[in-house]
Amino acid sequence: MHCYVSRQLPRTGRTGSRFISGLRLCHTQLLLRGGARTPLEPLEPESYWRDTLPNEALLRRLTVGEAPGGPRRRRGDEVWGQLTERGVDESNALGARLERWLAEHHASSEDEAYKEMPTMVLTSPDYRSSLTARAVLSGLFPPSQRADAAAVQLRTLRAAQTKLHPPEEKEDEARQDTAMDLTELLALEPDALEGACECGSVESRPWAFNGT
């Protein structure tokens, strides 16, 4: 799962961009989620994992800001590949840590203005990733601003629509899509991100976590 969280300030923006115009980037957060891992012990039975899934009340809270046509949970009998309650808790805690970090690094007399800065979220298009992003936002925004968190619209990364294991000839195209997403997000010229996907030249402060 890849999720970009950005806080932005007003500026004169480019026309024709699919992102919000009239903004200047203040901070970008890149979240990386670990992939499949081999267990050291035998897996618990399916009934155990089913009990770890979020209940309907929690799912309603996390999806309150989703558009009607947004990602939806797979059929009810599907257990594998779903976000668990522990994953929600970890993502919420991550958002809270990010909020504290932002407060420490942007504390100033303009604090109130900073609280009202737009937040942009780019995420992969699957349902689990959207729930994870919502859980991060619920921690990023204090309880008094939960309505603002719900109002944040999730934007889908074009590169994330590529298959999980794309054919070799598609890899360059996927990297180019990722670079273009970041180009538009950072309001940079395309040449400024040449080679960014290979060498990690885009400056950011990553928080890596392995949720379940």
Image (cartoon, helix red, strand yellow):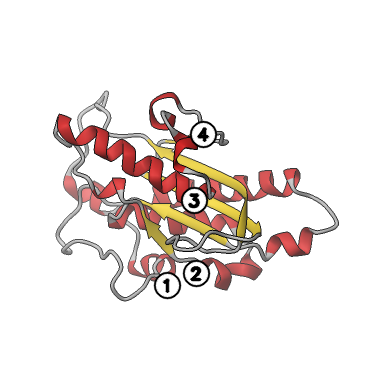
Query: Can you identify the residue that label 1 sits on?
Result: 64
The image's mark for residue 185 is: 3
* 120 vs 77, nearest the viewer: 120
Tell us which disc is closer to us: 1 or 4. 4
Q: Amino acid at mark 4?
A: Val
* Residue 128 percent coordinates (x, y): 31, 53
Q: Residues within 10 Å of mark 1 (few under 14, many from 20)?
A: few
Residues under numbered marks 3 and 2 in contact, where contact means CB atoms less than 8 Å apart: no
Q: Earlier in the sequence, mark 3 or mark 2?
A: 2
Is residue 212 in view? Answer: no
Label 1, secondary structure: give it: loop
Looking at the image, how many numbered discs can be counted on the residues? 4
Q: Amino acid at mark 1?
A: Val
* Residue 53 percent coordinates (x, y): 31, 55
The image's mark for residue 202 is: 4
Between marks 1 and 4, how big is the CA–CA gap?
A: 32 Å
Between marks 2 and 4, how big is the CA–CA gap?
A: 28 Å
Residues under numbered marks 1 and 2 in contact, where contact means CB atoms less than 8 Å apart: yes
| Residue at (20, 48) in percent of width and height | 80
Tell us which disc is closer to us: 3 or 1. 3
Between marks 3 and 1, how big is the CA–CA gap?
A: 25 Å
